Image (cartoon, rainbow, N blue to C red):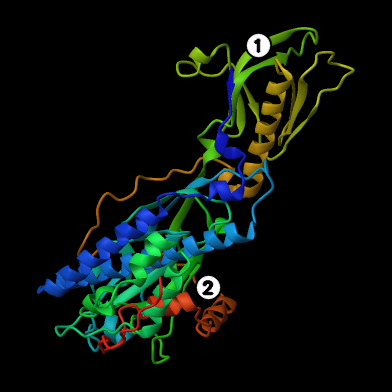
Amino acid sequence: MMTAPGHRLKTQDASDKDPDLQQKIDHEIKMREGTARLLAASKHPAQMIEAAKNLLTSNNRIISYMSELQRRKTVEATGRTLPEGSQLPCKAKIGLSDLRIPLMWKDTDHFKNKGDYRRYAVFCLVKIGTEIYDTSMINNVDRSSTDIAFEDVIVFDNVPHDFECSIEIYCHKLHEDLTIASTPKKIKKRFNDLSESVGRSVGKRLSGLHDSDIMGSMVLGPKFELVARGNLQLKDVDDSVRTFDLTLEASADGTSPELPLFGHYCCRLAALPYCLVQSAVTGFLNLQEDDDLSKWRRYWCVLKNLQLACWSSPADVEVTEPLLIIPVTKNTQISDADPRTCKRSQTFHVKTVQSRHTSEYTLAADTKEELSTWWDGFQQHLLDQALWKQACDYMMDIAEASPHRRKGIQLRKSSIYDETPLETSSSKRRISSNLKKEEDQLSQMLTTLMGEAKEIRGDSSQPSS
């Protein structure tokens, strides 16, 4: 008896398949419609700001889901998939926490407490693939705040090793009178273009709506601006809080955002590859004894978490420590057993070079089929470690995701100015050059989603479904 997880060996098309994607689009459309009605009916400024935030989040999710549907249909039409049986690395759980954004007020504003009376509401969108999460809203950010600290813990599941985590910072300047935000025609065109390629069920619903149905009820309300963004990858995964560069986004008139950002942000990006917590292969193996090469001892073995753990029987796994642990790390080599010292069939050799010594073991499976399964399992485990790199060195702790959103001012006992290391002049030049970075089509859509001060209701053209 032996088991091996079926998700390890799949084609790219099968692993990316998500039958619930269209249901997610329908859900977000309903959420957006309900939030837009709430925004139109709200009278209290705090309610309106929160509704505007939720509306922006729903729109981002809809755009992300529709773009993914379009990508999948393109892949299906072109037939670009991996060969059958190709090995892919395992996926992982990604956790982002301890997100802090330092501010840089003028000395007259922060230290002398005079001059600038601006107050802001700030939140972030965190994205990996099609999954988008919003942080809590931090209100009343003013000149007395040295930084913006979010207590949220955001967790993503089933993340591939080549992920990109995008952090977008949105800001609204608090004031008494609420502006009228416009939704430009290119946003409606983006929805219509995507609706033509994502299938009839979703496309018909999107393209069949009138302008007032799609955007008319969402034009009233506070305006959030995308002021900066950060990008994280596997190389940024660490068990401690680190500092990263921010890319500042220019406003509609080409000027820098009003929120006095320092140009950096701090966070902890942790990863827990599934190969550390899920068994790659389990089953019986026979181990050649060192003192007598003709003797073999039978073990129940579990391959996971950089080791092959061995017990006398499956019943002992949950109640006792393993009798033997064979390391399976990035320095491990799997090869056929030496026929001069091993006459038994279905055997293989495990050699691991460690800092102080080298461990070598000769193992044998009961059948040829089991030998093939174990061989593939060891190769998969080594592939996972090679591609997940430092994230596979040990198990990082990832806290549970935040159960709810916290509101109000988040106060810190100490200034982040004392905790943020100074950057070199080359880093400052890099931040300055990032200000000129070109905007792609999706960024334009997101930054203008709550628009400028004008209402659009005149365009009555209907796209074909």
Residue drawn at the location 45% of the way across and 70% of the way down: 196
| 452 versus 338 height, above or below | below
In the rendered image, the quadrant that contains the C terminus is: bottom left
> Left or right: where does residue 439 sit relative to residue 350?
left
Q: Position of residue 6 (x, y in %)?
A: 56, 34
Q: Nearer the viewer, residue 107 or 156?
A: 156
Q: Residues within 10 Å of mark 2 (few under 14, many from 20)?
A: few
Pointer 1 residue: 298
Q: Can you tell which quarter of the image residue 276 is in?
A: top right
Pointer 2 residue: 423
Q: Nearer the viewer, residue 465 or 281?
A: 465
In three-dimensional space, the C-alpha distance between marks 1 and 2, rounded to whole angstroms, equals: 57 Å
**Residue lying farthest to the right in this orientation:** 340
> Left or right: where does residue 14 sit relative to residue 226?
right
**Residue lying farthest to the front in this orientation:** 464
Number of the front mark, 1 or 2: 1
Q: Position of residue 28 (x, y in %)?
A: 31, 61
> Left or right: where does residue 358 sit relative to residue 119?
right
